[in-house]
Structure formats: C-alpha cells, structure tokens
Amino acid sequence: MLIPGTLTRDFAGGVANAECASWFGRDEGSVLVAYGDSITEADSRAHLGLHGEESWYSHLICEDEFADGRNAAVQGQTSQQVLDRLRADDVEADVIVVGAGTNDLRLGVDTATILRNLREAVRVASRRADVVVVTTVQPWHGTEADELNEGVRALAADAGAQVADFAAILAAPEATTDGVHPTVASAGKLADEVRTAVTAAG
C-alpha cells in the first residue's frame, strides 16, 4: 500500500503518467528550461525527472529535440512566485520559456502588476538564455485576459523575446480538460507553438 503524500506514492504516480524520464541528459544539444504554473507542470513530477504527457514541455524534451532541460513549473504559482524562483535559480540555458498569469487572474491580481512581474521575469531570463519565449495567458474561469495578452506581446517585442500564443490554442473547443488545463492533444499543440517561437528566434 502506498501512503498518500509520500515520495514513493509521488514517484509511482509520476511513473504512471510519464511520457518519458530525463534522468540523464545528452552531451550535445540545446538546453530548455520552463518556468510557469500547472499549465506547464501538468501531470509531470518534474522534481523526479518524470514528464507527463499533458505537459507541453514533455512533448519537446521526450522527443529529444533538446539535449537536456528542466521543467521548473509549479502548480498554483503566480507571476510573482515565478519571478522570485527565476531570480533565485542559478540556471543557464539555450532557451527559457516563461508562462504565468492564470493564477494571478484567479486571485484578482491587477493586469499592471502581472505585466510588471512578467516584464522583469523576461529581463532576468534574457541574461540566462540565448532565446526567451513568453506565453500568452489562459484566463481562469470567469476572467478575461485580452488586455493582459496584449501587454505580453508588447513586453516581448520591447525585450526582443518571442511569444508562444497558448491562449489562442487553449480557447479552442475541447482543448482543455476543465476550461483551463490542456488535454494531451493540446499539450502537443502548445509544444508546436514553442517550437515555432524558438525557430523564429533564429
């Protein structure tokens, strides 16, 4: 019997959902690091190196498009928490993806504050990676994110970052499991969007 909340149960759940495990990186190739919330973490157990198929990150790392990486997303985190973790981490990568804001909307954080946090997160990421991709924001139930996403596109243009339009993909019918989080098929489309953004950066 697996006791709830234990590392053994956590590991078993991760194995059950895993598309792949990234316990050993390859010696050559690009490194991808992703910061965000449950839309990126999804059903992964990233702290155990297990990547679930509902995470867009898994569709890139498991297909060996990147030599190594880290899914640094944490369920429930706000843009301020993502920024704080990015500042604290001593990480260097070829590509860093930053996606946050849905939980801010859930908690009633104003658009200006979210954009300030995302702008700073992109600035910090730009010192750590050759390519920075920022994602548009999937709104929480009963909220809207049009103004926020216009601001995301503007801050990316100002910073020389790329945009992955997650919001447009997740707004499609049956694209989510609950109105917010991607299905496996949608996670693959989000991965394609990140892939396109990275390619556009040259």
Image (cartoon, helix red, strand yellow):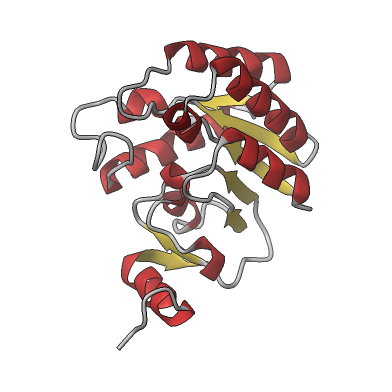
Q: Quadrant of residue 199?
A: top right
Residue at (63, 28) in percent of width and height: 201
Q: Nearer the viewer, residue 143 or 121?
A: 143
Q: Residue at x 51, y 16 (%)?
A: 148
The count of marks equals 0
Decide: is 39 above or below 101: below
Percent x, y of residue 85 = 68, 47
* Residue 68 place in picture, x, y as percent: 61, 59
Q: Nearer the viewer, residue 22 or 81?
A: 81
Residue 131, how many percent across, how many down?
Answer: 68, 35
Q: Residue furthest bottom?
A: 1
Quadrant of the image containing the C terminus: top right
Q: Is residue 118 left or right of residue 39?
A: right
**In the image, residue 6 lies at what x, y percent?**
45, 78
Q: Between residue 111 and residue 53, name the one nearer to us.
A: 111
Residue 17 in sight: yes
Q: Residue at x 45, y 59 (%)?
A: 62
Give the quadrant of residue 156.
Answer: top right
